[in-house]
């Protein structure tokens, strides 16, 4: 596949070197040689990079080579200091392009930009720190909106329970809207009562446990909302980072978890 589509590939393990030596290719492949700079996920240890570089350079199937790595804590002001030390150790004496910066480093560590940057989550308008306020002045905008609508309304007395497990009980008369969206659609089941949501243009919150196909919202702030009222679960007004933070995760997971059954409209 790499040869067929002329893809650039990341080389991070010995088995890939052997595969490149044995492959029958139409033309050499460009590669990114990955350095383990402390994340300890993929990549060669800094002290091995020179040896591996020379091995790869001697393989006729290898074209242009770029040194790459990935930062584990680039959202922190000092988060790339030690990784950069390791990368410099690995790159000493090598005249080669570098690709190091993920989203956080692209935003907040210009010294790590070098030849190529590899932004990820910021391409979707979410923050690599998990706090949308950190990117509020960057001009980034959310590219995904999860929308639904109200399909049912309940007018409840004080003391009534809502949803599985009765995790939420009303303390006064309360009007509740039922939204056609649940964890089978990719909305997090662990989202607690109080997770922000927009109903008919008014900010309110979820109440009770998220069900497979439905969730409940408080209609107190939006008494005009009824059947068919539009609901934004995340998007321009409801930041995906806020929903993720309420659920103990990151916006990336929510975007990745969107279920195939959810209709997608590309604008």
Image (tube, rainbow, N blue to C red):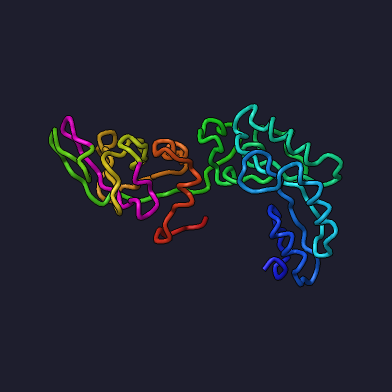
Residue 187 lies within the magenta run: yes
Q: Position of residue 161 (x, y in %)?
A: 17, 39
Q: Position of residue 50 (x, y in %)?
A: 81, 46
Residue 116 lies within the magenta run: no
Question: Vertically, is 219 above or below 8?
Answer: above
Q: Residue at x 77, y 58 (%)?
A: 30
Q: Is residue 240 left or right of residue 31?
A: left
Q: Is residue 131 left or right of residue 261?
A: right
Q: Is residue 27 left or right of residue 110?
A: right
Q: Residue furthest top?
A: 77
The answer to which of 131 and 221 lies nearer the viewer is 131
Q: Residue at x 71, y 56 (%)?
A: 14
Q: Position of residue 5 (x, y in %)?
A: 70, 67
Question: Vertically, is 250 above or below 79?
Answer: below
Q: Quadrant of the N terminus?
A: bottom right
Q: Quadrant of residue 201?
A: top left
Q: Quadrant of residue 86?
A: top right
Q: Position of residue 110 (x, y in %)?
A: 72, 34
Please give the count of numbered marks on the rendered protein.
0
The answer to which of 35 and 205 lies nearer the viewer is 35
Residue bounds of the magenta highlight:
168-190
Question: Vertically, is 158 above or below 20?
Answer: above
Q: Residue at x 75, y 69 (%)?
A: 23
Q: Residue at x 47, y 38 (%)?
A: 241
The answer to which of 150 and 193 lies nearer the viewer is 193
């Amino acid at each position: 596949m790499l040869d067929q589509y002329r893809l650039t590939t990341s080389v991070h393990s010995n088995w890939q070197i052997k595969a490149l030596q044995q492959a029958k290719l139409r033309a050499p492949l460009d590669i990114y040689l990955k350095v383990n700079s402390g994340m300890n996920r993929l990549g060669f240890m800094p002290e091995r990079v020179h040896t591996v570089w020379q091995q790869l350079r001697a393989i006729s199937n290898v074209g242009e080579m770029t040194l790459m790595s990935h930062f584990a804590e680039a959202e922190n002001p000092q988060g790339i200091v030690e990784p950069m030390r390791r990368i410099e150790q690995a790159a000493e004496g090598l005249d080669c392009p570098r690709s190091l910066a993920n989203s956080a480093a692209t935003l907040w560590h210009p010294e790590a930009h070098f030849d190529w940057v590899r932004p990820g989550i910021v391409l979707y308008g979410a923050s690599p720190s998990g706090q949308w306020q950190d990117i509020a002045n960057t001009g980034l905008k959310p590219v995904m909106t999860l929308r639904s609508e109200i399909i049912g309304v309940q007018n409840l007395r004080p003391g009534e329970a809502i949803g599985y497990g009765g995790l939420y009980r009303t303390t006064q008369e309360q009007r509740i809207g039922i939204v056609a969206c649940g964890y089978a659609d990719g909305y997090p089941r662990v989202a607690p009562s109080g997770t922000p949501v927009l109903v008919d243009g008014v900010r309110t919150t979820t109440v009770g446990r998220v069900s497979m196909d439905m969730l409940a919202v408080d209609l107190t702030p939006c008494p005009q909302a009824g059947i068919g009222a539009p609901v934004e679960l995340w998007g321009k007004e409801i930041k995906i980072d806020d929903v993720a933070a309420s659920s103990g995760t990151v916006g990336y997971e929510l975007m990745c978890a969107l279920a195939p059954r959810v209709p997608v409209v590309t604008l």
